[in-house]
Every structure is written in C-alpha cells, then in structure tokens.
Image (cartoon, rainbow, N blue to C red):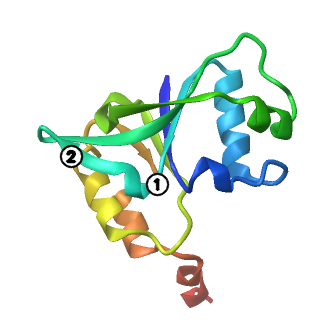
Amino acid sequence: MNICFLMYPWKEIDAENDSSLALIHECVKRGHGVAMCTPLNLTIRNSVTCASCKVIKRVDKIPNSLKSFYNRTTLREEMLPLAGFDVIFMRSNPPLDPLMLNFLDSVKDDVFIMNSVNGVREANNKLYTAVFE
C-alpha cells in the first residue's frame, strides 16, 4: 500500500513521543510505501491535485526504536499525485487549513482519507466535544 501522511514538517517531530512517527514507523515495518507532506506542499499541476512529498527510502533493516528510526530515515523529495495513494492520514495540528480540505475534496472519491473531510470541517478541534453533556 502507498500511504501519505499530511502533517507538520518532518523536522518538527519529537522522536521519542510523536504518535505520527509511531504510525509511520509501523507502516514502514509492514512494508508499505510512505510519503509525507505538509498542507503548504499541496498544489495543482495540469489539473491534478499533487503534493511535494518527502518519501521514505526503503531499507532492509528497520530500527525498532522510534528515535533510531527517525535518526536513520533517509528521505527523497518527489512531486506525487494525491490520487495515487491508497490512504491519506490527516495528522496536521489544529487549526485546520480550509484550503487543505478543499484540496482533499478534489481526491476524496479516488483515495481513502482517514477522517472524513466533511466531518473534520464540522468538528475541527477538541472544543467540539465540549458541547456534549
């Protein structure tokens, strides 16, 4: 499977405590292709929604610890169509960028997006749960 993590920059990851890194690590361990991009890396080229991605280069031996995995991971940059992924994980921090959601709207019928785009629009932060008694 090819998986894209739409998230904050790789350099901002806390290698010892980051849940996105744990998800990425597990995907790589299971042999999936993994790429990451930020909302600022989304674009449209020739009427195709794309992202400038950092793609994790495949290696034979994957470190078990998250810190070692993070420090040893080699990335290459590549412009990729979002519809070419099997799954997109939205892992960006609030507040969510409405423009990012518009980009995702353009591919939601072609790729499985973890978290409904419309659901994220309606409940885009943790304050949403405060209205429940």
* Residue depicted at 56% across the width and 56% down the height: 8
Instruction: Tell me the residue that label 2 is attached to.
Output: 44
The image's mark for residue 115 is 1
N-term mark: 2 or 1 = 2
Q: Is residue 116 visible?
A: no
Element type at marker 1? loop
Element type at marker 2? strand
53 to the left or right of 28? left
User: Could you tell me if the residues under marks 2 and 1 are in contact, i.e. CB atoms within 8 Å?
Assistant: no
* Residue depicted at 87% across the width and 34% down the height: 65
110 to the left or right of 47? right
Q: Is residue 72 above or below residue 62?
A: below
Q: CA distance from mark 2 to mark 1?
A: 22 Å
Q: Is residue 60 above or below residue 106?
A: above
Looking at the picture, how far across and down is residue 115, in whole percent?
A: 46, 54
Q: Is residue 84 visible?
A: yes
* Residue depicted at 22% across the width and 49% down the height: 106
Which sits in the foreground, 13 or 121?
A: 13
Looking at the picture, how far across and down is residue 73, in whole percent?
A: 70, 30
Looking at the picture, how far across and down is residue 37, in whole percent?
A: 47, 46
25 to the left or right of 105? right
Q: Is residue 35 above or below residue 125?
A: above
- Could you tell me the amino acid type at mark 1? Asn
29 to the left or right of 98? right
Task: Between label 2 and label 1, give the one nearer the viewer.
Answer: 2
Say which quadrant the C terminus sits in. bottom right
Looking at the picture, how far across and down is residue 82, in whole percent?
A: 33, 38
* Residue depicted at 83% across the width and 25% down the height: 63
- Could you tell me the amino acid type at mark 2? Ile
Which sits in the foreground, 118 or 79?
A: 79
